[in-house]
Image (spheres, helix red, strand yellow):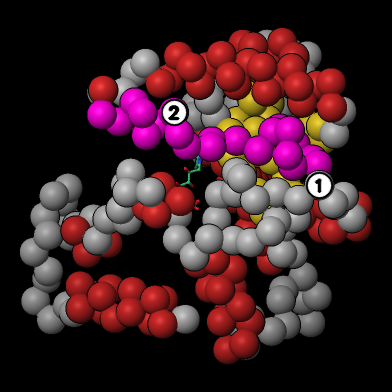
């Protein structure tokens, strides 16, 4: 018998339910972090989940920089503030004030910050699947980030992704070599609570789009369902299931 194949490829109904509960209850956390330390056993499990993400040509281009130093976090917070002030000026007048009122990071509040990177040279210059679209390595690191985010939620921990930086400023503070890209800067910690819906939706900034308007058939923009398909109806049903969950 081949011992390298999964003996049971069925996921139990309970496991499936739990998976969707994690997916739908994951939130981006900014203002609800508690100072309580994160257990290293838990952090290790979350990092293993990230490390088991798919990657182009099994390149595994990620590294994980765990940042607990208050000094480093302060430096990162300073460069966030600079970019955040610049960002405010980019929005139209009426949105500017709302933007300024949003809390968009938990750098100093979360006990652990983690930068997930992409090593653009990992495993050499020619990688299966990356021969024509070079960004596939970056997308792979993003997959690791999503695994990290979901695993943290499964552990009851919150994650907030902070992206309002000049990339060079972040690279300087973290001593990243030229070929290492900081793909995700994440804040991790216990939380007071998770919101039920995205905060940007709660404050009226942006609503979730209707999924059935984002699904096309055969060609870009074609929303006409092929004969016999009831996918659009099912998409609505699936949304109801999620809301009732
Ligand atoms: C690539 C990426 C960058 C993000 N950057 C920020 C950020 O700088 N600050 C922030 O508050 N949220 C950031 N977010 C979180 C999004 O605002 C959030 O995912 C979205 O509003 C939906 O909310 P939810 O994650 O709670 O479902 C980022 C998310 C992604 C995927």
- Look at mark 1 in the image and give the residue it sits on: 35
Write the residue at 54% across / 36% down: 104
Residue 193, percent from left and from top: 63, 61
Q: Splitting the image into 4 quarters, where does residue 52 fall?
A: bottom right
Magenta stretch contains residue 213 = no
Residue 238 is at least partly visible in this image = no
- Look at mark 2 in the image and give the residue it sits on: 100
Residue 185 is at least partly visible in this image = yes
Write the residue at 26% across / 23% down: 93
212 vs 41, left or right, is: left
Q: Which residues are magenta?
A: 94-116
Q: Are marks 2 and 1 in contact (CB under 8 Å)?
A: no
Q: Earlier in the sequence, mark 2 or mark 1?
A: 1
Write the residue at 72% across / 73% down: 5
Within 10 Å of disc 1 (Cα), the crowding (few <14, some 14-19, many 20+) is some
User: Which residue is at the front of the view, 62 or 107?
Assistant: 107
SS at circle 2:
helix
User: Which residue is at the front of the view, 203 or 233?
Assistant: 203
């Amino acid at each position: 018998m081949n011992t390298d194949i999964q003996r049971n490829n069925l996921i139990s109904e309970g496991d499936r339910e739990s998976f969707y509960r994690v997916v739908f209850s994951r939130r981006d956390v900014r203002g609800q972090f508690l100072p309580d330390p994160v257990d290293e056993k838990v952090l290790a499990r979350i990092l293993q989940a990230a490390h088991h993400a798919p990657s182009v040509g099994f390149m595994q281009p990620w590294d994980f920089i765990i940042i607990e130093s208050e000094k480093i976090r302060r430096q990162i917070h300073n460069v966030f503030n600079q970019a955040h002030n610049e960002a405010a000026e980019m929005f139209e007048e009426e949105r500017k004030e709302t933007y300024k009122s949003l809390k968009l990071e938990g750098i100093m509040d979360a006990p652990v910050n983690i930068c997930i990177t992409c090593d653009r040279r990992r495993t050499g210059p020619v990688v299966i699947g990356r021969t024509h679209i070079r960004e596939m390595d970056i997308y792979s690191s993003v997959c690791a980030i999503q695994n990290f985010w979901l695993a943290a939620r499964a552990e009851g921990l919150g994650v907030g992704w902070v992206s309002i930086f000049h990339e060079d400023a972040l690279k300087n503070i973290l001593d990243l070599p030229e070929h290492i890209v900081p793909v995700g800067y994440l804040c991790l910690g216990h939380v007071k609570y998770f919101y039920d819906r995205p905060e940007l939706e709660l404050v009226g900034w942006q609503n979730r789009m209707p999924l059935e308007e984002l699904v096309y058939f055969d060609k870009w923009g074609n929303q006409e369902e092929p004969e016999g398909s009831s996918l659009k109806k099912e998409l609505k049903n699936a949304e109801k299931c999620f809301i009732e969950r």
